[in-house]
Image (cartoon, rainbow, N blue to C red):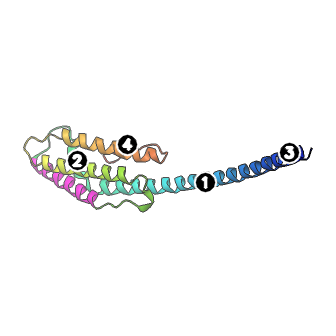
Amino acid sequence: MKKIWLLGSALALALALTACSDKTDDKASANKDKEATTEKADVSGTLLDFYLNLKGKVNEKDSDLNAYEGAQTPPPAADRQKASDSAAAVAEELKGIKIPSELKGQKADLEEALKDFADSYQAKADELKKDAPSLDAANATFEKGQEKLAKAFESAKLVAPTFSAEVQ
């Protein structure tokens, strides 16, 4: 009888300890989820600020390029030169943009996107120095950058912007 009573007590103690440890794990899990949610919110704000800054810096320097690309008839050589200078200025500006340390989870995608954007604008600058420029290759590089930018936004659970529409 003592063995049964001892076995029953041990079983009851084991169940009690298991129940207590589950509550502790649930609390720890809830705290981790809350911290992750807070961190995501902070990252999304920083990512949006980074994007708005990026867009602003490009739009400050690309007006002549946009005028050239939006022209209905072939612009004169002087306008082509202004567009080339504008594209080169944007490429240089993009090379100097730093990614905030808070965006460490998106850093690789953002660095690749910035490189593709800078390469695209530099290719446009170089191509516009020719008599018959073709911007197709530069535009393809820009699209690659836009895809990498979208990947960074999606990793932060944000809707990806259409960068090309906002810088023209």
**Residue marked by disc 3:** 8
What is the quadrant of the N terminus in the image? top right
In reply to whether residue 85 is colored magenta, the answer given is yes
Q: Report the magenta residues as a range.
A: 77-95
Residue 135: which numbered mark, if any?
none
Q: Which secondary structure lies at badge 3?
A: helix
Marks 3 and 4: in contact by CB < 8 Å? no
Mark 2 vs mark 4: give the one in front: 2
Q: Residues within 10 Å of mark 4 (few under 14, many from 20)?
A: few
Q: CA distance from mark 1 to mark 4?
A: 33 Å
In primary-sequence order, the first of circles 4 and 3 is: 3
Q: Which residue is label 4 attached to?
A: 162
In-image side of 118 versus 107 (left or right):
left
Nearer mark to the viewer, of 1 and 3 = 3
Circle 1 sits on which residue? 32
Task: Please rate how many residues cluster around mark 3, counting C-alpha atoms within 10 Å: few if below 14, some from 14 to 19, many from 20.
Answer: few
Q: Answer above or below: position of 136 versus 122.
A: above
Given residues 77 and 125, the one toward you in this image is 125
Question: Residue 120 — which label?
Answer: 2
Residue kind at label 4, given as amino acid type: Thr
Q: Residue at x 49, y 55 (%)?
A: 43
The residue type indicated by label 3 comes to: Gly
Calculate the distance from the C-alpha at mark 2 to the C-alpha at mark 4: 16 Å
Tell me which secondary structure the magenta stretch mostly adopts: helix
- The nearer-to-camera label among 1 and 4 is 1
Asked which secondary structure carries label 1, the reply is: helix
> Residue 12: image x %, image y %?
83, 47
Single out the residue that lies furthest toward the right.
Answer: 1
